[in-house]
Amino acid sequence: MAMAGTAGTAGKNSRTEWRNWAGNVTAAPARVVAPASVGELQEAVRRAAEDGLRVKAVGTGHSFTAAAATDGVLVRPQALSGILGIDRAAGTVTVAAGTALKDLNRALAAEGLSLTNMGDIMEQTVSGATGTGTHGTGRDSASIAAQIRGLELVTADGRLLSCSEKENPEVFAAARIGIGALGIVTAITFAVEPLFLLTAREEPMRFDRVTAEFEQHVAENEHFEFYWFPHTGNCNTKRNNRSQGPAAPPGTVSAWIEDELLSNGVFQAVNSLGRAFPATIPSIARVASRALSARTYTDIPYRVFTSPRRVRFVEMEYALPREHAVEALRELKAMVDRSRLRISFPVEVRTAPADDITLSTASGRETAYIAVHMYKGTPYQAYFTAAEQIFTAHGGRPHWGKVHTRDAEYLARAYPRFGEFTQLRDRLDPDRLFGNDYLRRVLGD
């Protein structure tokens, strides 16, 4: 998810406050800049260094960690937006870093093109989403960052560095998921392909069945994911596979009922009720999970992969070796069942193939993701702490943009190439111009 926030001004003499989407992270930068060109960004970086201020770029607020928080210079890259070039022969598109994924997806579709895979929301900027390792689910296709073929970033000395497999390859290997530690990304070149259709099949399934058949579902589908409803034995599965068509999107009324009323409107009301009266949550979960029905529809990729998410929450997600996923899930369910916890949000399970990005959560291993959520304003620490103990016992790697308590000592063991990244950071940003408290914790000094 993106490293970002929304700003609101307090009193005349106070700093502008930065706040993320979930409202669990705030910061007070000394100044905010919105460069209209790469040159202006380079100058802002140089000036920050001269003034002894740290500098961070932010997007739209969808990180739950303080990855983008700063007390120095806050850079808003939204003016650096839009498609910069399309190379149909090479199958690539170059886009400015402040472009929102929703704008990229729509622009690509208008050109008859698409990313191969994407996450389940598209509000983030492309640089924020890739920089924290945003992903969807896929048997063969990996995260958004794994689809990067080149990028440009402004380094701590104000230079603009171009990176690809052929140009500065050691930086390219790391900067695709750089957590904002190596520089400020200004442009990204993605691999794209001709627009295609996906058929989505959503189907309720019992927890015991979906976990018993997990590997089979992953093997048989290009994109498989499921949601388990705590306090129940019920899940909802989703299988997305390429289709020859024709397009058959959900009807306007049914789409509104599923995606707006049930997923946002009623879900908001149910969570508000659960926050006020936690004892009602298990009963609500049983009724809600039993009310799910199967549906099938066919559409272009971004309309199948993504959906609106207006109910605000806090999230933790861990990437586990895929062969450990089912055991960890069963342990998570047993923990919830025997506890006094009241969980109103479903647990999300997705997969990714191994990739070659230095600090990707799927770096070097077949991966399954387990994400736990709590409604905004609900105490989440006890649940997340218990879940994290299960995930770390299975060698889990936390999502860089979601709540976790891991530090550099743990992460150095979890990532075989961790030292490669920190050595590159020492070279590119020895004075930690792009540092903050979060990076100090997860990467060390």
Image: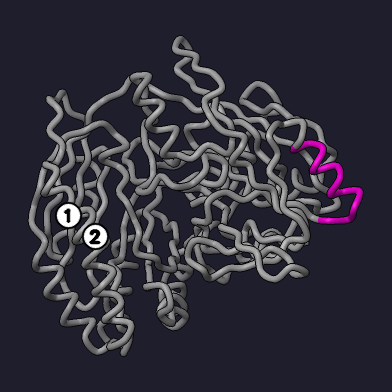
* Dominant secondary structure of the residues highlighted in magenta in the image: helix
Viewer-proximal residue, 105 or 425?
Answer: 105
Image coords of residue 300 (percent x, y): 26, 31
Q: Is residue 315 visible?
A: yes
Q: Residue at x 75, y 47 (%)?
A: 425
Location of mark 2 (residue): 263
Residue 88, percent across and down? 44, 12
| SS class, disc 2 | helix
How is colour applied across the structure in the image? Answer: one colour
Magenta segment: 41-53
Q: Label 2 is placed on what type of residue? A: Ser
The image quarter in which residue 182 lies: top right
Q: Do the residues labelled 2 and 1 touch (CB within 8 Å)?
A: yes
Query: Residue beneath label 1, please?
Result: 258
* Neighbour tally class for label 2: few under 14, some 14-19, many 20 plus, Cα within 10 Å: some
For residue 43: magenta? yes
In the rendered structure, the answer to whether residue 125 lies left or right of residue 179 reads left
Q: Where is residue 14 in the image (x, y as percent from the top left)?
A: 74, 69
Between 147 and 30, the one nearer to me in the picture: 30
Q: Is residue 209 above or below residue 116?
A: below
Q: Is residue 251 left or right of residue 270?
A: left
User: Residue 30 appears at what percent x and percent y?
Assistant: 78, 60
Q: Which residue is drawn at 33% across and 19% down?
A: 112
Amino acid, disc 1: Glu
**Image point (14%, 75%), residue name:** 286
